[in-house]
Image: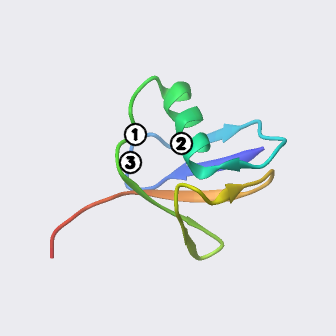
Amino acid sequence: MVTVRFKLSDRGTIELPVTIPLTFQQVLEMCEEAIGNSIGPVLAVRNEKVLNLLDKVEEDDVIDVYPALSGG
């Protein structure tokens, strides 16, 4: 099970049954299917490191996802 926690958002936490390594892009697509809506640009963190879309996600990972905000 992969746990995706959407921070600063009303999406909450989504748990996905993942038994093989997937890319973070694939996990995001699974989240979009689960909520029935596009997620948009995000910043994701796992174990205090930023994830990119091609990073592998494995069973028991916990990922914190933040909306990507621009500005200064």
3 left or right of 5 in image: right
Q: Position of residue 58 (x, y in %)?
A: 77, 53
Inter-mark Cα distance, 1 to 2: 8 Å
Q: Which residue is mark 2?
A: 28
From this view, report whether residue 10 is shown above or below residue 56.
above
Which image quadrant for residue 13?
top right
Q: Are marks 3 and 2 in contact (CB under 8 Å)?
A: no
Q: Name which residue type carries label 1.
A: Ile
Instruction: Find the residue positioned furthest to the top.
Output: 36
Residue drawn at the location 35% of the way across and 50% of the way down:
41
| Numbered badge on residue 39 | 1
Q: Which residue is mark 3?
A: 9
First-in-chain label (3 vs 2):
3
Q: Are marks 1 and 2 in contact (CB under 8 Å)?
A: yes
Q: Name which residue type carries label 3.
A: Ser
Mark 3, residues whose alpha carbon is within 10 Å: few (<14), some, or many (≥20)?
A: few
Q: Name which residue type carries label 2.
A: Leu
From this view, report whether residue 47 is shown above or below residue 44.
below
Query: Which mark is nearer the camera, 3 or 2?
Result: 2
Inter-mark Cα distance, 3 to 2: 15 Å
Residue drawn at the location 53% of the way across and 35% of the way down:
29
Inter-mark Cα distance, 3 to 1: 10 Å
Q: Position of residue 28 (x, y in %)?
A: 53, 42
Secondary structure, mark 2, is: helix
First-in-chain label (1 vs 2):
2
